[in-house]
Image (spheres, grey):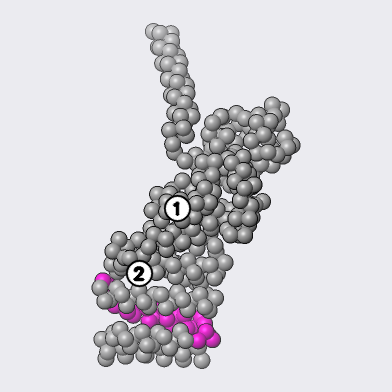
Amino acid sequence: LDSSVEGAVQVAIGALIEYADNDADAMRSLGGDVASRTDRADVRLRALSSLYNAAPNGRGEHGRLRYEMLLLVIAFGERAGLSSALHPVFAKVEEYGTQWELSPADRRGLLDAVASALVAGGDLAAAHEYKLKALHEVDPAANRSIEAEAERAAAVVTQSIMLDNIFRFDELPDLESVRALEHTHALLWELLNILISGGLKEYLAFHNANSAYVADTLKLSHEALVRKMRLLTFASLGIAKQELSYEEVASALEVEVDEVEAWVIRAISSGLLDARVDELGSRVVINRSTTRVFTKQEWQPLHQRIELWKRNLDALSSMLAAKRAAISAYDQ
């Protein structure tokens, strides 16, 4: 029966190509009929994919038709719980937007559709990436108010803060809609800047003054934010110094000394640090730490490390040259 349904759709597609010259309205109508129900969902998804592939590829009207058919496929996949089957397509939507010469609004619509499907499939981290990409799609000719853009930006920033795997926030203010939060969502803007360059103490002071805002308005977990801020604070410590005593780490993270090793493991697992623990010396030796924001203040310790490496390499080079000279003199 399933093969009969697919066969019928293929015959209809063949007729569209042969006799209707890929009539756009006929394709839309057939696609709407196939997507109108979700029984035999996998068969319907394959049929919709065939219809999409049969649509003429190109720019202008052809690109517009492809765009509409792809939106139909993605929306059906979301409703039918088959979004995971479309991940290879999701990875190409930006390429399609360029290929079909879509407007910024249509490119944003495509990215929004992918994000919605990923949310429905439970992949919030991947969905967030597409929501962030959608923020970049701004049509200068559109009459959308900065307040409307700021609302969208506020949702993306809040999700960035919520997701456990996101620790870099310094690029968000590059977007005009995010910068607008300073005026439209002042408290969220303040929290974002704490995550960009502040420490645990700054966050705790913010929460002490705005606990209801964090919990009730943003729907964020205070405990999760404390955990994230401890890890970010640890990263900042690792930029400033290559060796940290247990007491220094415990003080900055506001934890007991016997908890420090567990926080080292968490920071390494999060990708923020490359470090080792010297249990005998009760110290943490930092090999690499993630820089949270590149300011002059952040560049200074990096510059000092590079200069130290350079001096060490120069000393090693001089030592090797002296050894070679000594060996050469001995041979003679």
1 or 2: mark nearer the eye: 1
Numbered badge on residue 183: 1
Q: What stretch is highlighted in magenta?
A: 37-59
Visible residue check, residue 57: no
Q: Which amino acid does label 2 sit on?
A: Asp
Q: Is mark 2 on a helix, strand or loop?
A: helix
Q: Name the residue under label 2.
A: 106
Q: Position of residue 143 (x, y in %)?
A: 33, 65
Q: Position of residue 31 (x, y in %)?
A: 40, 84
Numbered badge on residue 290: none
Is 114 situated above or below 25?
above
Indicate which disc, 1 or 2, sits on the residue closer to the N terminus: 2
Whole-angstrom CA distance, mark 1 to mark 2, is: 28 Å
Label 1 CA crowd tier, 10 Å (few <14, some 14–19, many 20+)? few
Residues under numbered marks 1 and 2 in contact, where contact means CB atoms less than 8 Å apart: no
The residue positioned 67% from the left and 34% from the top of the image is 251
The residue positioned 69% from the left and 26% from the top of the image is 281
Q: Is mark 1 on a helix, strand or loop?
A: helix
Visible residue check, residue 242: yes
Q: Is residue 249 left or right of residue 68?
A: right
Give the overall secondary structure of the magenta segment.
helix
Label 2 CA crowd tier, 10 Å (few <14, some 14–19, many 20+)? some
Q: In this view, does 325 lie to the left or right of 285?
A: left
Q: Does the magenta stretch include residue 53?
A: yes
The residue positioned 37% from the left and 62% from the top of the image is 145
The quarter of the picture where the C terminus appears is: top left
Q: Please state which of residues 212 and 304 is positioned toward the viewer in this rendering.
A: 212
Q: Position of residue 215 (x, y in %)?
A: 63, 57
Q: What residue type is labelled 1?
A: His
